[in-house]
Image (cartoon, rainbow, N blue to C red):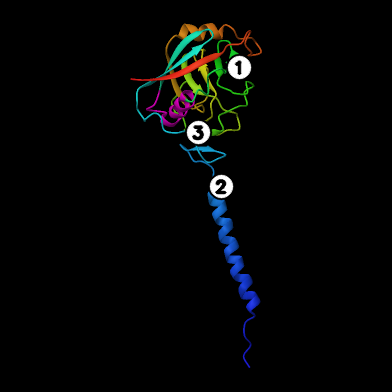
Amino acid sequence: MEQQPDRRWIILAVFAVIAVGVVVAVLIGQGGGSDGESTSKSGKGPDQVLEPGEAATAVVKTSEGTFDIALDTERAPKTTNSFAYLAEKGFYDGLDFHRIAPGFVIQGGDPKGDGTGGPGYTVDEKPPPNLSYTRGVVAMAKSSADPPGRSGSQFFVVTAPDAGLPPEYALLGKVSNGYDTVEKIDALGTPQETPKRPVLIEEVTIERE
């Protein structure tokens, strides 16, 4: 009499196929954000508030005066959009410039105030390969472990003639007005790169032309 296949092995084989399919689906769903994507723990990045190429200026009002940033929405559409999104939510209001390295950069936008904070999501957008971080250029800060072009909320203004940085920091724009305020803030730095007194970001507003 011909031996019939054991039904238990068939059932186990079916469950094995289903399990493999579930694992593959989970791995695909957990893939990291690729270049140009916004990612967060919740899977949601910033809303679209600026269009690529749209003329826009960020007006940064500080306790030392006001300066303007001409946002480079053409070469850095995702980075500028994220900054504008946070600004319009009032994210930057009341934060400070926690790092002031005289003759190098002034850096702010950290809700923790110690260089480790962010908005809860990141944006990946590689800067132009020929970008030079010269006086007045504004870019986004990142850790050495982050890939080129990754940013959260922290930004810096270059106060050196040329900071000599590699093109790894996401471009935001350039100071278009009020650089004297940037110089006043720069003068408040110390060799430890901490401010002599608190320098607050009172408000950041976005002006569209």
Residue at the image point whose x is 61% and y is 67% from the top: 15
Residue at the image point whose x is 57% and y is 6% from the top: 187
Give me the C-alpha separation between circle 1 and circle 2. 34 Å
Q: Which quadrant holds residue 3?
A: bottom right
Residue 182 colored magenta? no
Which is the main secondary structure of the residues drawn in magenta?
A: helix
Q: Which residue is mark 2?
A: 30
Q: Position of residue 142 (x, y in %)?
A: 56, 27
Which sits earlier in the primary sequence, circle 1 or circle 3? 1
Q: Is residue 31 visible?
A: yes
Q: Nearer the viewer, residue 200 or 161?
A: 200
Q: Which residue is mark 1?
A: 98
Residue 73 colored magenta? yes
Q: Is residue 180 left or right of residue 5?
A: left
Task: Please tell me how crowded label 1 is: few (under 14), some (14-19), or many (20+) other residues with Cα within 10 Å.
Answer: many
Vertical side of 80 occupied by 18: above or below = below
Residue bounds of the magenta highlight: 72-88
Which sits earlier in the primary sequence, circle 2 or circle 3? 2
Q: Amino acid at mark 2?
A: Gln
Q: Which residue is mark 3?
A: 123
Which element type, helix, strand or loop, lies under badge 2? Answer: loop
Which element type, helix, strand or loop, lies under badge 1? Answer: loop
Q: Position of residue 58 (x, y in %)?
A: 43, 19
In the image as oriented, which residue stretches furthest toward the front?
A: 89
